[in-house]
Image (cartoon, rainbow, N blue to C red):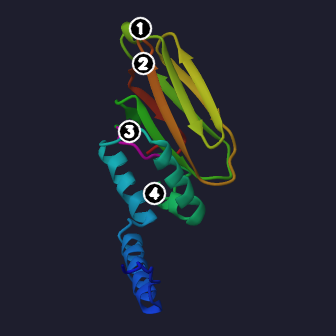
Amino acid sequence: MTSLRSYRPSGGFVAMLFIHVAAVALIGWGLQTPELDQVWTLEHALKAGRQSELSPRDRALLQRAFAAHPDLAGGLIEGRSIALLTAHRSGWCSRGAAVLVRLGGSDTEVDVRIDTSPEGFPVRVELEGSGWRRDVSFEKGGVVQVALPKTEHAEVVSVTARGGADGQSPTAFEISFEDNP
């Protein structure tokens, strides 16, 4: 009867295995989309109207990119202090959601206008930035001025408008500010 002996792998085998694992990891890392390319893709999806709301992942991506590249936000909004990144017509957002980008260092006020059929009321508009949130309710059409808190760095502001009997229907709205073209 022969005994079964266990053999240890040789040093050369371990080195070859390590090289193959490292090569696969390097290729996987190299195939990832760079962060700025992801920002560019997201910007085009927003401006083209393919997307109107940000997922938590998208919001975090933009905030990380703004922190890592301080001039990026100014480039996205073409040198203004605040601008809509979402597709719009003279400030009117028809899909019930919008994304604003604003530079840091100043207080900002935005005007929110709701104009919809009587069945569309009441309407609740939420503005949310980094660590703050503002809620505005409309029982009928009109304009409300909303003061956004001062921020040190560029930030993303999400705006959503929901109304109707269920309070969940997307509602068109207009958002305007001093820098609106």
Q: Residue at x 51, y 62 (%)?
A: 72
Q: Residues within 10 Å of mark 2 (few under 14, many from 20)?
A: few
- 109 to the left or right of 120: right
Label 4 crowding class (10 Å Cα cut-off): few <14, some 14-19, many 20+? some
Q: Amino acid at mark 3?
A: Ser
| Mark 1 lies on residue | 165
Distance from the alpha carbon under mark 2 to that under mark 1:
8 Å
Magenta stretch, residue numbers: 84-88
- Closer to the observer: label 3 or label 2? 2
What residue does disc 4 label? Answer: 76
Residue 51 shows which numbered tag?
A: none
Judged by its main secondary structure, the magenta piece is loop
Q: Amino acid at mark 2?
A: Gln
Write down the residue under mark 2: 168
Q: Earlier in the sequence, mark 2 or mark 4?
A: 4
In the rendered image, residue 4, in percent from the top left (x then y), is placed at 41, 78
Mark 2 → mark 4, Cα distance in angstroms: 30 Å
